[in-house]
Amino acid sequence: MTTSDDLAYYGYRQELARQLRFRDLVAYGLVYMVPIAPMAIFGSVYAGSGGMAALAYAIGVVALVFTAFSYAQMVKAFPMSGSVYNYAGRGISPPVGFLAGWVILLDYVLVPGLLYLVASVAMHTTVPAVPVWAWLLGFVAVNTIVNSVGIRMTAVVTRVMLVGELIVLAVFIAVAGWAVASGKGRFSGEAFYNPDTFTWSVVAGAVSIAVLSFLGFDGISMLAEEAKGGARQIGRAMAVGLVLAGVLFIGQTWLAAMLVPNPSGLLADGDPNGTAFYDAAQATGGSWLATLCAAATAVAWGLPNSMVAQVATSRLLYAMARDRQLPAFLAKVSIRRSVPINATLLTGAVSLVLSLYMATRADGITLLSSLINFGAMVAFLVLHVSVVVHHLIRGRSRNWWAHLVMPAVGFAILAYVVVNANIAAQRMGLAWLTVGVLVLAGLYLSGRRPVLSGLAPATSQQRRDVERV
């Protein structure tokens, strides 16, 4: 007998192996977010927020706590891979689900390319003898091999990498904390509030950049079909990972803000070279600390972070393909490894081509960052609407707090951030959405309109498929 916790209830077979424990899920989320992620974009957030970098991250984590809560509600309703694509498709309607999946593809497909590019440029700066393209090939090859072996191998590698990142962060916090206590820098709370520069629109614009560091907590939902303990574990892991990352982000940016060598210059000129955090580290502990932070950031983005990003992307492609909304070959699962092998390989290939192309553009990193943030935040907005439609309107829930107040507050905060985001990102994001609408129209014209099996009882053939597994 099947229940709503079983894939058979939705007409699917359990093809992916359930091997991930709660700690694996939390580690996956932390690695995806990268505990030292602010080191790479600290200067942009600092300049964009008028020096209130810690406030930008604090608002970011508060906004996304509401989003994590909405994810928890929807993953309990639909415990399967596909994230917002499935939640919107089943919670609102299949066409809306397709467009939500299309929008979040902007996030998931581009994220690995951005990570590989940032890491390769940083490593080339550290080791100029090795060209950017060679670093790109190396990072993509390693991650694709590990992810093709199986999810357990990915979990083991990411846990090891996470420990290394946390050690580097602990070293920086210890040295920076001692420096501030010894009178270096300027002990103050201006990183949280500066009356001379504060406006809500300025902070919201900075939050739209800072949110990049948090993207990845939502990737945990992609592992719903590979987690032990069911949907409840997914929701808990997302909340715990997000809060832990938020504390780490706020702490390190507060310390760095107090130790910036030339704060007025950073506010006026920005951080075009992306070295503001490392400059603060050098002023704090010397060149060894700056080099340690820079190298750790490059390795973290190029290996564990992009590794788990590839996992999430491949699961989204797999979920859409098995519903015939992407080419069917992407739904193929390796029987021996229990991984969507074709989706994994395609993600690696697309990431390599994309990052090689963007490496030739002067604005490659900025362009990718803007598009990724826009896609993710629009998908989160759709997620909040899905909670209200599925639970409150269709399910006639009277849990007003969980199914109306929480998603409404989360929607309002993110909508304000989207409105104040980079104008170029808004235009390109809307252009991508327009292409998605045209693709959807093409599906209808070809007789392949979006249909999700979870919206109806499993067919006889689907039940027989499940029984054979």
Image (cartoon, rainbow, N blue to C red):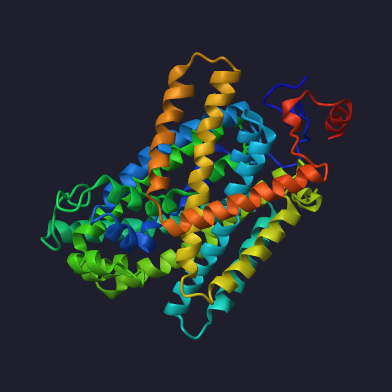
- For this view, does 335 lie left or right of residue 56? right
Instruction: Identify the image quadrant of residue 409.
Output: top left
Q: Nearer the viewer, residue 462 or 150?
A: 462
* Quarter of the N terminus within the rendering: top right
Extreme bottom residue here?
Answer: 129
Q: Is residue 133 visible?
A: yes
Up/down of 183 relative to 443, above or below: below
- For this view, does 386 lie left or right of residue 17? left
Q: Tell me which residue sits at (30%, 48%) in the image.
A: 201
Up/down of 233 relative to 45, above or below: above
Q: Tell me which residue sits at (48%, 64%) in the image.
A: 367
Q: Is residue 160 visible?
A: no
**Where's residue 383, x and y in %?**
54, 35
Q: Nearer the viewer, residue 38 or 59?
A: 59
Up/down of 315 relative to 129, above or below: above
**Where's residue 42, x and y in %?**
33, 60
Q: How many marks?
A: 0
**Where's residue 259, x and y in %?**
20, 62
**Where's residue 87, x and y in %?**
61, 34
* Quarter of the C terminus within the rendering: top right
